[in-house]
Image: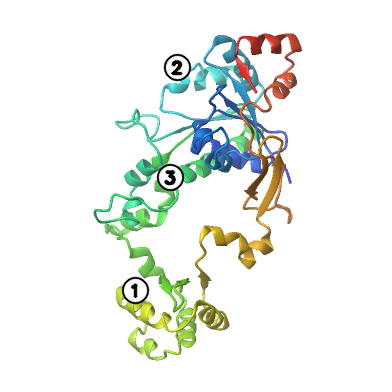
């Protein structure tokens, strides 16, 4: 199910946002060519030593890699030739950097009017913060998102990257829209998003609540309104609960707990929401009475929305995850077995497009340059000048 078959994307990104956006397009069947500097490549390659870190693998599946020094005129000439035939290009730099590299929108649009040009920044293309460096936690902090997940004086930040991944998703969505529009107009567009805008867009409910009411949500506002809990059982294992708004789920939960008195203590959703802390304390005491397996049987029998909390290493063995067959294993000719996750959507019941292991640095350089019509003599010359690698 290569729904983007025939679409070629040039990935000039580093770290997460640009590479992840490009990888999402690759998962839909696009031919994504990652262009990297010889010798070092994407800085994420060396995050764990070597040039094939888990961080790099996670954001660069299904791509081909060209090692090309496009800071030199001869290398830039080749990159421009590649972009002249591409459908989209994605990069994540501070504003002005692509122009300094000779890869600004105006130049590339004149070269290839059909090219969809995706520029990802930290804070937008202009404004008082535009020139600042930005990584994931910066986007989380400025957008208001981090304030809903962290308080107090502890300098540690928990959880995985959020702003980085979200920005990649929104960039991919924007490129898909531009590619669809191009089918009608025949002309590519400049697509822009930023970590700040993407993370704010994802925080649509808390920001929307503030705009509608003038009241800023607190850390537990969402959980109290949705009646969400994470409860520990007698064996120390935890269960996630989410009663939402239908009364039937609250009633089913009280039956599972054998606590009809809670229907009187908390007679409606408003009382449960306003007394969220008190409900949570009651649940903490009650769920310590039985093991997680015992509770899950009771909750399922009473149609309560729940799930066991899985550690990351437990997720692949969960029965539902195994049923959906969400993981695969490929063999890289240099690095051996490489495991990955299948894309999160299917078409006509089929989940996979073309699967490739994350590429070694410059693994496909000569393959792609030959596809461009570059002959053996010129390839030899480019190698001798150290303009290409792989």
Label 1 Cα crowd, 10 Å radius (few <14 / some 14-19 / many 20+) = many
Q: Which label lies toward us, 2 or 1? A: 2
Label 3 Cα crowd, 10 Å radius (few <14 / some 14-19 / many 20+) = many
Q: Position of residue 234 (x, y in %)?
A: 44, 79
Q: Nearer the viewer, residue 68 or 112?
A: 68
Residue with the mark numbered 3: 163
Q: Distance of mark 3 from mark 1, alpha carbons?
A: 29 Å
Q: Nearer the viewer, residue 189 or 339?
A: 339
Q: Secondary structure at mark 2?
A: helix
Indicate which disc residue 273 carries.
1
Which residue is depicted at the point 41% across and 22% down?
Answer: 96
* Residue 147 appears anywhere in the view: yes
Q: How many marks?
A: 3
**Is 302 drawn above or below residue 92 in the view shown?**
below
**Is 100 drawn above or below residue 5 in the view shown?**
above
Residue with the mark numbered 2: 100
Which residue is depicted at the point 41% across and 46% down?
Answer: 199
Indicate which disc residue 361 carries.
none
Say which label, 3 or 1, has the lower sequence index.
3
Q: Nearer the viewer, residue 93 or 38?
A: 38
Callout 3–callout 1 Cβ contact below 8 Å: no
């Amino acid at each position: 199910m290569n729904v983007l078959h025939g679409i070629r994307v040039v990935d000039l990104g580093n770290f997460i946002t640009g590479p992840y956006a490009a990888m999402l397009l690759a998962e839909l069947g696009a031919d994504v060519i990652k262009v990297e500097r010889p010798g070092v490549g994407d800085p994420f390659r060396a995050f764990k030593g070597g040039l094939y870190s888990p961080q790099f693998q996670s954001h660069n599946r299904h791509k081909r890699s060209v090692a090309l020094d496009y800071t030199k005129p001869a290398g830039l000439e080749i990159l421009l030739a590649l972009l002249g035939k591409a459908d989209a290009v994605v990069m994540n730099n501070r504003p002005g950097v692509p122009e300094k590299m000779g890869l600004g929108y105006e130049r590339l649009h004149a070269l290839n009017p059909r090219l969809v040009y995706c520029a990802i920044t930290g804070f937008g293309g202009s404004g008082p913060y535009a020139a600042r460096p930005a990584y994931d936690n910066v986007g989380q902090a400025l957008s208001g998102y981090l304030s809903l997940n962290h308080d107090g004086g502890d300098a540690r930040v928990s959880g995985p990257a959020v702003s980085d991944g979200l920005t990649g998703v929104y960039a991919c969505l924007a490129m898909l829209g531009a590619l669809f529009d191009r089918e009608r107009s025949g002309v590519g567009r400049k697509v822009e998003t930023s970590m700040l805008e993407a993370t704010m867009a994802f925080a649509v409910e808390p920001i929307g609540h503030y705009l509608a009411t003038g009241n800023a949500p607190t850390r537990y506002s969402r959980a109290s309104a949705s009646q969400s809990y994470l409860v520990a059982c007698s064996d120390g294992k935890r269960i996630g609960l989410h009663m939402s708004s239908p009364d039937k789920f609250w009633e089913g939960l009280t039956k599972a707990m054998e606590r009809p008195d809670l229907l009187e203590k908390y007679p409606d959703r408003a009382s449960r929401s306003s007394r969220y802390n008190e409900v949570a304390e009651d649940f903490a005491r009650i769920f310590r009475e039985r093991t997680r397996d015992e509770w899950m049987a009771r909750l399922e029998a009473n149609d309560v929305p729940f799930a066991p909390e899985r550690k990351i290493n437990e997720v692949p063995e969960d029965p539902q995850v195994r049923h959906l067959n969400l993981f695969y294993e490929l063999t890289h000719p240099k690095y051996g077995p490489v495991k990955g996750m299948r894309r999160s959507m299917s078409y006509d019941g089929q989940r996979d497009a073309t699967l490739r292991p994350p590429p070694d640095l410059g693994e496909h350089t000569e393959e792609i340059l030959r596809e461009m019509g570059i002959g053996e003599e010129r390839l030899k010359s480019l190698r001798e000048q150290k303009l290409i690698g792989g």
